[in-house]
Image: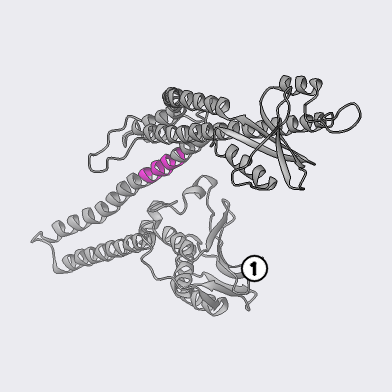
């Protein structure tokens, strides 16, 4: 690949690494194959040589049965037929015959086809067995060039020898050809590897180029997939998913920045207007105090919003300590319901409680309490003068607290963005109640930290139900 690398790393490119690995593998494979071929040829040649000697020995053994005169008695001269057949076989062989002389001592004769037998005079008057061993030893001393086969057939000893030189020369020629051809084969394989690798990593290079072409100003661009190679297509798909997450995060950050700027600018503008109005010397003390009270209210509201933003940031950075232990839901719901009744003031809102009071959840009781307070506060603000109901429910391995209000409900187009920061279905009413549009976002974040979830059901004119689902304490 053509990517530039810093001199400190000095890492090889993917193409160079693959070509190097392929070249080493090819060289090793060719060398091992050549060695196995040479060894195989040597073994087969040696086996064939020994088999040829064994077959020749078998033929000679059968011919030695003819070594007799017409009357059946042994003769000292090889019959003419035997001589012709033995000489026609070719090769190198020696036949000796051991008999007993007049005094009973063994005598060894060398039998030459077509010639009378000639006695072998051993040095130091050695016995017949010593003569045979001496002949075998002398033949074996010829070295690696010959293979000698010694077989006995009654009174006859057969010595056959075959030269190894022909097949050794063939092995030498094969080894020389390997020495000459291996570099050529290695060079050709490296060239083929370079072409194959170049074609193989072309899709990866294209993915890399398309990824580098994606800029912060245009995060909507995607990498082409499929690429023709499954693994590279997986990489391209992964990059596209990453780009989608980055694009959503970038859009959310831009929206958050704009919303936060707007939310901070509004109270600051209000504060500045109140301060400028109060600085007028013509204002009576009562009006100045009223303006300062308004400034204090805006400062308090802004402070709450900043605290909420810091809480969201700490939650997203996993800086909040989250407990995971069983706790009873009923006492928690009773406490939140009492606080909710206080929230309603004299508005005529009825707070009710129902459901299974024996349910226990697994999670953080303090965080769950804050989630329920946020949901209850939202129900009070948007529930009108009807009722706010708390109901304990169970669904398999999950237990939940459903908070239902009798308000006007939420239109379907608002539901997907209901938990976004600073999003308000009725911005004017939320501002009147001091809301900044962060309550549901905080509730969702706190729920996710303890493996919980918030579900919402709502329709215009039918009220809304927010349910906090938590893992059941007795779930397996």
Q: In which quadrant of the rendered image does the N terminus lie?
A: top left
Position of residue 108 relative to residue 289, above or below, is above
- 75 is within the stretch colored magenta: no
Q: In which quadrant of the rendered image does the C terminus lie?
A: bottom right
The answer to which of 87 and 290 lies nearer the viewer is: 87
Residue extending furthest toward the front: 102
Residue extending furthest toward the right: 71
Which percent across, then down, holds residue 85? 77, 21
Residue extending furthest toward the left: 281
Which percent across, then down, holds residue 238? 47, 41
Position of residue 336 relative to residue 31, above or below, is below
Which percent across, then down, holds residue 270? 23, 55
Callout 1 crowding tier (Cα within 10 Å): few <14, some 14–19, many ≥20: some
Image check: 11 left or right of 149?
A: left
The answer to which of 316 and 467 lies nearer the viewer is: 316
SS assignment for the magenta stretch, majority: helix
Q: Residue at x 59, y 37 (%)?
A: 139
Which percent across, then down, holds residue 308? 34, 63
Q: Which residues are magenta?
A: 240-251
Where on the picture, by quarter, is residue 307? bottom left
- 245 is within the stretch colored magenta: yes
The answer to which of 175 and 272 lies nearer the viewer is: 175
- In the picture of the structure, the residue carrying the numbered disc 1 is 394
Position of residue 468 relative to residue 138, above or below, is below
Q: Secondary structure at mark 1?
A: strand
Image check: 217 left or right of 283?
A: right
Where on the picture, by quarter, is residue 170? top right
Q: Residue at x 45, y 32 (%)?
A: 27
């Amino acid at each position: 690949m053509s990517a530039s690398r810093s001199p400190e790393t000095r890492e090889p490119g993917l193409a160079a690494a693959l070509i190097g690995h392929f070249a080493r593998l090819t060289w090793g494979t060719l060398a091992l194959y050549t060695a196995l071929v040479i060894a195989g040829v040597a073994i087969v040649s040696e086996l064939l040589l020994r088999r040829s000697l064994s077959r020749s020995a078998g033929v000679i053994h059968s011919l030695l049965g003819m070594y007799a005169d017409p009357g059946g008695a042994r003769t000292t001269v090889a019959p003419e037929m035997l001589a012709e057949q033995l000489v026609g076989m070719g090769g190198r062989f020696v036949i000796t015959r051991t008999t007993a002389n007049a005094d009973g001592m063994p005598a060894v004769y060398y039998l030459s086809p077509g010639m009378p037998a000639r006695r072998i005079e051993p040095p130091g008057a050695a016995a017949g067995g010593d003569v045979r061993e001496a002949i075998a030893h002398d033949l074996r001393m010829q070295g690696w060039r010959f293979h000698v086969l010694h077989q006995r057939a009654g009174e006859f000893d057969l010595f056959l020898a075959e030269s190894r030189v022909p097949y050794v020369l063939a092995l030498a020629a094969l080894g020389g050809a390997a020495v000459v051809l291996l570099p050529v084969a290695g060079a050709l394989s490296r060239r083929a590897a370079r072409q194959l690798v170049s074609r193989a990593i072309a899709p990866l290079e294209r993915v890399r180029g398309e990824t580098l072409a994606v800029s912060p100003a245009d995060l909507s661009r995607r990498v082409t997939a499929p690429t023709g190679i499954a693994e590279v297509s997986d990489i391209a798909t992964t990059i596209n998913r990453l780009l989608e997450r980055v694009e959503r995060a970038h859009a959310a950050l831009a929206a958050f920045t704009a919303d936060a700027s707007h939310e901070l600018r509004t109270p600051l503008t209000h504060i500045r207007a109140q301060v400028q109005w109060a600085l007028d010397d013509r204002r009576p003390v009562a009006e100045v105090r009223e303006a300062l009270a308004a400034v204090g209210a805006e400062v308090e509201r802004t402070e709450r919003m900043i605290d909420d933003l810091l809480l969201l940031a700490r939650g997203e950075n996993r800086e909040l300590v989250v407990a995971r232990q069983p706790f009873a839901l009923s006492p928690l719901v009773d406490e939140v319901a009492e606080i909710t009744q206080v929230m309603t003031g004299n508005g005529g809102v009825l707070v009710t409680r129902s459901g299974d009071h024996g349910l226990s959840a697994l999670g953080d009781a303090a965080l769950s309490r804050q989630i329920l307070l946020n949901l209850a506060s939202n129900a009070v603000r948007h529930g009108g003068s009807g009722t706010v109901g708390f109901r304990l429910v169970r669904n398999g391995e999950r237990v939940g607290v459903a908070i239902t209000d009798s308000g006007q409900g939420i239109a379907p187009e608002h539901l997907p963005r209901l938990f976004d920061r600073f999003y308000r279905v009725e911005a004017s009413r939320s501002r009147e109640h001091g809301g900044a549009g962060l309550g549901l976002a905080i509730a969702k974040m706190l729920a996710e930290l303890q493996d919980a979830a918030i579900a919402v059901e709502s329709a215009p004119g039918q009220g809304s139900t927010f349910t906090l689902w938590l893992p059941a304490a007795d779930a397996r």
